[in-house]
Image (spheres, rainbow, N blue to C red):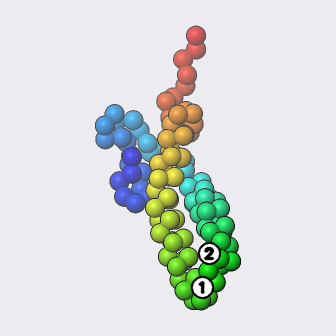
Amino acid sequence: MLSGYLTVRQSCPVCAEPLHHQRADDGPAYLTILIVGHLMAPLLLFVFTHWRPEPLMLATAFTVGTVGLSLYLLPRLKGAMVGLQWAKRMHGFGGALPVE
């Protein structure tokens, strides 16, 4: 579905479903911030209260962890957002439903 890190292809290479009308916009970034924040904040508190590492070491480790987790989740959440739009027939996916 993605041709680059975050670039959505014009169409699916397997089934030729057009993907050009997807509207993921800022949704994947917001979800990434939400997930990473909810994972890293309690972990930061736990590490700080149990081991009391040096502040520079703590900041360095959590900065690397936060950036790494964000870079890992962002393209996956973008694919999930486009997939959700496709499944819900939003923004032009699937056209109009047939009237019975």
**What percent of the width, then of the height, locates residue 66?**
54, 71
Residue 5, compared with residue 17, is above or below; it is below
Image spot of residue 9 (x, y percent): 38, 48
Which quadrant: the C terminus? top right
Q: Please name the residue that numbered disc 2 is placed on.
A: 47
Residue lying at 57% horizontally and 37% vertically, measured from the top left: 90
Q: Secondary structure at mark 1?
A: loop
Q: Residues within 10 Å of mark 2 (few under 14, many from 20)?
A: few
Tag count? 2
Q: Which residue is mark 1?
A: 53
Determine whether label 1 and label 2 are within 8 Å by CB: yes
In this image, 67 relative to 4: left or right? right
Q: In the depicted view, which residue is nearer to us: 50 or 20? A: 50
Q: Position of residue 19 (x, y in %)?
A: 43, 42
Amino acid on which disc 2 is placed = Val
* SS category of the residue bearing label 2: helix
- 44 relative position to 20: left or right: right
70, above or below 3, in the image: below
Q: Is residue 59 visible?
A: no
Q: CA gap, disc 1 to disc 2?
A: 8 Å
Q: Residues within 10 Å of mark 1 (few under 14, many from 20)?
A: few
Q: Amino acid at mark 1?
A: Pro
Foreground residue among 10 and 43: 43
The mark found on residue 29 in the picture is none
Residue 63 vertical placement versus 94 (above, below): below
Q: Position of residue 26 (x, y in %)?
A: 59, 57
